[in-house]
Structure formats: structure tokens, C-alpha cells
Amino acid sequence: MNIQQGLRDRRVLNKNWSLVKRHNALSQRASIIQNIRKFFIKRGYLEVETPYLIPSPSPEAHINPVVCGYWFLHTSPEICMKRLLAAGYEKIFQICRCWREGERGNKHIPEFTILEWYRSNIDYKELMKETEELILEVSESMGFKEKIKYQGKEIDLSIPWEMISVNEAFDRFTNLTLKETLEMDVFDELMVERIEPNLGIKKPTFIYDYPIERSSFAKAKAEDPSLAERFELYMGGVEIANGFSELIDPDEQRKRFEIENNIRKRLSKPVYPLPEKFLNELGQMPPSAGIALGIDRLVMVFLDKDSIDDVVSFTPEDL
Amino acid sequence: MYTASDLRKGLKITIDNEPYIVVSFEFSKPGKGQSLYRTKLKNMITGLTIDRTYREGDTFEPASLEERPMQFLYKEGNQYYFMDNQTFEQVVITEDSLGEAKNFLIENLNVKVLLFKDKAIGVELPNFVNLRVIKTEPWVKGDTSKADFKPATVETGYVLKVPPFIEEGELITIDTRTGEYSTRVKG
């Protein structure tokens, strides 16, 4: 072997092969994000940037913020984005990093990329429609087929998508009703073990009307206040997005936060100060709907990857 | 004592006074819900597998197993023979009980044999072992466009994904905890 060949080989051997392997996925990811941005700009949405570092994280029973100095890294941009809605910004979107402490698995990474968009004067049903249009349009711009393959299963993206209420899902896929599930405190277990694997299999699925106690920021349904106007989108069994008609009553919102904080106390988790400025301004917010979509997860499904590690440049373990 | 967030593949815990090993593990968190740790656990005595889902805050006792340093000698059929480094006494473990560890056992490898009430029921491997590649597709030198890992068979018959530059006959280091390629042994 001549010296030049030897040098070239050494350069190849010293490469970070797990990064080399992700090159294609990362370029597709960039295109997907660019197409998402185009979709919102075309529809007259304003792209906003809100601070990552905030003094009061969203009070959620089961989402833990990363503490950063005296403040916290946001777990979602929702509190600041809703303050913009309350100030009259009617159509806004943001693509940003969020942090959730301790969440690590095939579909979780503690630092991840979220897309959130909010729109005044629509409800969760109209928001579901816009979500369909977004994903279909991005898929077409990427040149993907109408039927995409995910982990050996075919998902047909043609509209309309499948709709199932949380109530029906428990009746269809478990031996318990929703009411029994809540009484026995096995909602999350049954959701993960029995329901999620059946969602978004032939078509993407919206599962909607969640129990009110699992929807701390969502508006109660007028016909049945035990349920909230909240939905989740699943594709290929993977949870992609969570959206709802926004709760705009400040007193009710404060009560919901207190319930969340009481659960945190019961679980011996730290409780943080309430976002008082948000609560003060919430009364000005027009009826609106908003949604958070996991960009990493959407890329996973589009690119047929079973691990989130395959669609990010570096995992925490790589650093 | 372990908590649910310590769960990972290969962890050994006690359930109903019997030792179990985590064979697969998945972190789940349904929207706005709590963290769930879904596991498949193998009873290390009976070999039977069960599914269990744990919540954040659940706790476990480690499996109470005795560990003895031994050397792998040879296999005969599905029986694997090990020798105690101190007493020179030999013990036999079946292929079923070894689980994935069988993929990394080469003669003279030093391991820890795990005993439950004096019966050998498994082994604890070193984190890294070196194994020789006996079969893989050749690489077109300098071609970095084909970055995809390719399958390679090592001397134990185990097949794994390796970077494209690995050639037949080379020695590679494998992480026994994940079963994945780690580095090439320069030689």
C-alpha cells in the first residue's frame, strides 16, 4: 500500500461513522422543516421566537423541566405563544427546541424540536383539518407517495383521516370502559399497551375528546364537561401531535394548574411558581386553537426510522 | 435498590423472590401522561418471559445472585462448559439460560458465572469482547458514498452491522451490552 492510500484510509477510519450514516436523514429533515415553514408563511402565519429560558414552566403533572440557573428551559413555548394571542397576534407559528428532563427512549430525547401553531377563531376540529393539510402538503413537496411505508406497514395519507374518540378507543381496543379505566387508574398503561399500537395504522388517526383531568390547557366540551376538546394525532402507532381548543377562562385555568401541582406534590416532585403574567393576560385571549407537533417524530415516520436517534445529528450519548 | 428509571436491558431484579433479567425495555409517555417503563422480563430459573409495565417511582431489589469468576471452556450441543478459576470445578449452562451471551462466548473468555442457590443460571460478560469477522462483503476502498453499515458474521456465528471498511479476517470490538460494533482492533 502506498503512503497516500494509507493516509486516505486513516482519514476514513477516523470518521464518525454514525454521523456519516445519518447524512441522508439529516438533509431530508432540513427539507421537511423548510417545507413546513413554507406552508405557514403561505397561509399568512407569523413566525415567532419566544424565550427558551423562562421563570415559570408550564404546570404539568408529568412533564419535568430542566432547571437552568434560577430559571428553567421551556418544555413547550405555549405560555409565551398564548400571551401573543392574547395581545392580538391571530395566526402564529414557531419551530424551536424544547427540553424535558428524563425523557429518553426510542421515541424520546430530552432536547427535541417542536412545531407549535396557534390560530384565533377556530376550534380543535378545524385545527385537525389544518394538520391534515400541513402533513399532506409537506409530504407532496418532499415527493413522497400518498401511501408511505412505516416499519412494514402502509399509511395512506389521503384525506379524510381516521377519527376515533377516546371513549370509542377504550371500547374497541380494551376490556374496560373509559370510566372504569379512570377509576382503576390504568389510563396511561392501557393507552400505551392496547390503544396506541392500533392508531394511525392504515391512515393517520386523530383520537379526540380526552378526559378533562388529562388536558390542563384545553377547553371543556360544552355538552360534556368531563371531556376536553383535545386531540392527539398518531401515525404508525407513533404519537405525532397534541392539539386543543384553548381554555381562555383565567379562573378555570388557575384551578387546573392547582390540580396539576397537587399531583406533583403527591408524587414528591418539585412545584414551581405559577405563570402569573400569563394568567393575567389570558382573559384577553380570543377563542383559539393550538397544537404542538414533534418534528423529530414526523421525520421518523416520513423516513421510516424506528429510533429518534436516526433523525437527529447528536444524541446526548454522542456528546 | 433500583427505581424504574434505572431499568435497562440486562438489569437483574427480584420479583416474588426469584431473579429476573430485563430482556427488552421501552420508555413510553402517552400525551400528557406519566412516564411508563415497559419491559419484557425473563425468569432466570424457568426461562419464562413476562411483560411488565412500571411507573416512575416504582422500586426493585437487585436479583440476589452469587457471582464467581470462571473461564468459558467449550460447548457441546446446547451445553456450555465453564471452569471455576479458583476451584477448577466445572459447571454447565444451557444455551437457553445464556440468552444473548452465547453470541460473545469464545474459548478462554473470562466471565462471571451467576449462581442462584448454588445453581449456575447465567453469565455476566465483560462489557467489550474482541471477535474475528469471518464473513462480510468487501469494500471498495475510498468509497465513502456508501456509508450504510453492512452485515458481518463473527466467529461465534453472530451477525451484526459493521462500518463498510471492515474486512474479512479483521478483529473487531463488540459492546456486549448492546450487541453493537464498537471499534476495529488495530493490528
Image: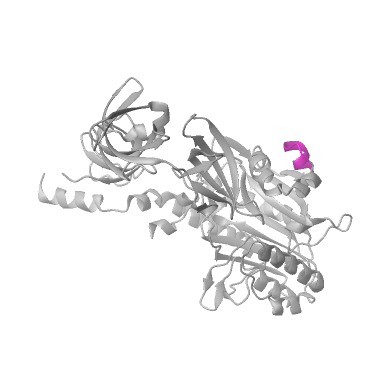
Q: Exactly how many numbered labels are in the figure?
A: 0
- Residue B78's x, y, as percent? 36, 22
User: Magenta region, mostly helix, strand or loop?
Assistant: helix
Q: Nearer the viewer, residue A270 or B103?
A: A270
- Residue A159's x, y, as percent? 71, 44
Does residue B91 appear anywhere in the picture? yes
- Residue A88's x, y, as percent? 74, 76
The residue furthest left is: A2
Q: Nearer the viewer, residue A105 or A267?
A: A267
Residue B134's quadrant in the figure? top left
Does residue A30 sit above or below B125 in this rendering?
A: below
The residue furthest right is: A223
Q: Which residues are magenta?
A: A168-176
Does residue A106 appear anywhere in the picture? no
- Residue A255's x, y, as percent? 78, 69
Residue A116 shown left or right of residue A254 in the figure:
left
Q: Quadrant of the C terminus of chain B?
A: top left
User: Which residue is painted at 35% across and 51% down in the image?
Assistant: A20
Does residue A76 sit above or below B175 in this rendering?
A: below
Residue A41 shown left or right of residue B175 in the figure:
right
User: Which residue is painted at 77% across and 40% down in the image?
Assistant: A176
Q: Nearer the viewer, residue A215 or A129?
A: A215
Residue A37's quadrant in the figure? bottom right
Residue A269's quadrant in the figure? bottom right
Residue A173 belongs to magenta span: yes
Residue B31 shown left or right of residue B86 in the figure:
right
